[in-house]
């Protein structure tokens, strides 16, 4: 069962969304709807499913509907039409009490502007969700202390947010979100306000945490490199429509839409595509006539950049193996050239 599912979700902002819905369903564009009805299409028939333990990145330009989408998951926004399921249960049918439980225990949100309480210390900020849950003081301090350590902020427990850099403040945001041990983390442009180097550090830290915690993460960004680095799957929004969902390499190799292709054009493929994605099967390799150079073994998940010099400079053939050493396929100069030049 998917952890999170959206089924045919429409969100229309304005005076009378229900009167406008049929027009959207008939295929009117966001621009037409705005011009003809003064309503704004936030989401247009979005369906997606997110597996437990994966990082799902939702990418799109400003105004494409990313925040609207993520806010449907914790019901900060209700759809004009459609269903939102968490653990297979339609959260639109939740009463106030169930909704509160869901927000307190099942999911946490990390915001672009950090959203910390300025008059609370790091410790108090991180412990806040636990306080709301009614956990005793002793447990709160213990758990919050561990989370502060996990994001590398030990020693800063009694400082106030204004005494910290942006990157450190967002570490507090992350620690606070993790403190209640939610199954789902919702991160809306959480790293977008940070300087590039700090941002890169935060991405690495999130990947490291996630390799241990296996949360279901919905991560929003307008940055393709960030999507490719963090996402197990990436969904691309354009004008409220989900125009493509795929694994990073699928998005790069087969952009399903002009809009996606425009994003993908300048990506360094060698950093994104993996050996297993571009290799020839052993049968095909044999029937093509084997390459003449030396053979080097690389793991199937290696990125092209890791073995590029072996092929281009040393003229080696790459034998792709799995973690047990079994042969999965081969890569010669030709496959490499093709995969790097595809547009
Ligand atoms: N409360 C609202 N009232 C009216 N229009 C809104 C509201 N929230 C968002 N919108 C509109 O919905 C569209 C999607 O917004 P949003 O989800 O915030 O985009 P993103 O997060 O991708 O920048 C935009 O055109 C925006 O102007
Ligand atoms: Mg937004």
Image: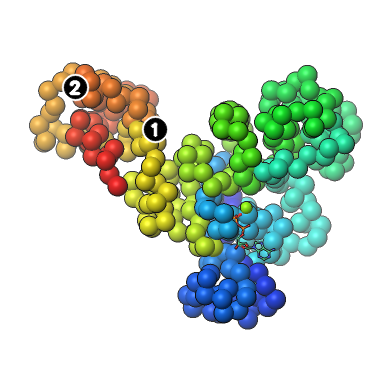
Check disc 2 and report the residue beneath it: 315
User: Which callout, 1 or 2, points at the residue further toward the start of the chain?
Assistant: 1
Mark 1 sits on what residue? 271
- Figure check: 282 above or below 248: above
Q: Secondary structure at mark 2?
A: loop
The answer to whether residue 186 is seen in the rendering is yes
Residue at 53% x, 69% y: name it.
30
Which of the two residues, 227 or 292, is positioned nearer the viewer here? 227
Foreground pick, 20 / 5: 20
- Total marks drawn? 2
Q: Position of residue 131 (x, y in %)?
A: 86, 39
- Tell me if I can see residue 300 in this picture: no
In the image, is residue 25 above or below residue 226?
A: below
Circle 2 Cα neighbour tier, 10 Å, few/some/many (<14 / 14–19 / ≥20): some
Which corner quadrant of the image does residue 55 belong to? top right
Residue 296 lies, in percent from the top left, at 25, 20
Q: Secondary structure at mark 1?
A: helix
């Amino acid at each position: 069962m998917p952890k999170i599912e959206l089924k045919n979700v429409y969100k229309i902002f304005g005076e009378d969304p229900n009167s406008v819905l049929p027009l959207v369903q008939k295929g009117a564009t966001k621009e037409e709807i705005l011009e003809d009805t003064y309503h704004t299409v936030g989401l247009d028939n979005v369906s997606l499913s997110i597996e437990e333990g994966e990082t799902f990145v939702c990418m799109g330009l400003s105004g494409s509907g990313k925040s609207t989408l993520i806010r449907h998951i914790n019901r900060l926004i209700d759809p004009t039409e459609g269903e939102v399921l968490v653990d297979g249960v339609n959260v639109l049918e939740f009463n106030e009490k169930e909704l509160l439980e869901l927000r307190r225990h099942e999911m946490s949100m990390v915001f672009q502007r950090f959203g910390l309480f300025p008059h609370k210390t790091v410790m108090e900020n991180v412990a806040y969700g636990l306080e709301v849950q009614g956990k005793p003081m002793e447990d709160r301090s213990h758990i919050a202390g561990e989370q502060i350590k996990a994001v590398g902020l030990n020693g800063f427990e009694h400082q106030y947010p204004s005494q910290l850099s942006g990157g450190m403040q967002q570490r507090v945001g992350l620690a606070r979100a993790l403190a209640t041990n939610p199954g789902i983390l919702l991160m809306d442009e959480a790293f977008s306000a940070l300087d590039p180097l700090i941002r890169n550090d935060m991405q690495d830290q999130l990947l490291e945490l996630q390799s241990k915690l296996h949360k279901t993460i919905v991560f929003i960004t307008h940055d393709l490199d960030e999507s490719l680095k963090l996402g197990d799957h990436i969904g691309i929004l354009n004008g409220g429509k989900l125009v493509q969902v795929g694994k990073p390499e699928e998005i790069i190799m087969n952009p399903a839409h002009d809009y996606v292709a425009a994003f993908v054009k300048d990506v360094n493929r060698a950093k994104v595509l993996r050996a297993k994605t571009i290799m020839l099967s052993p049968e095909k390799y044999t029937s093509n006539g084997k390459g003449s150079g030396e053979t080097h073994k690389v793991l199937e998940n290696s990125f092209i950049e890791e073995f590029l010099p072996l092929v281009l400079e040393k003229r080696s053939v790459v034998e792709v193996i799995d973690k047990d050493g079994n042969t999965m396929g081969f890569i010669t100069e030709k496959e490499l050239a093709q995969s790097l030049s595809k547009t």
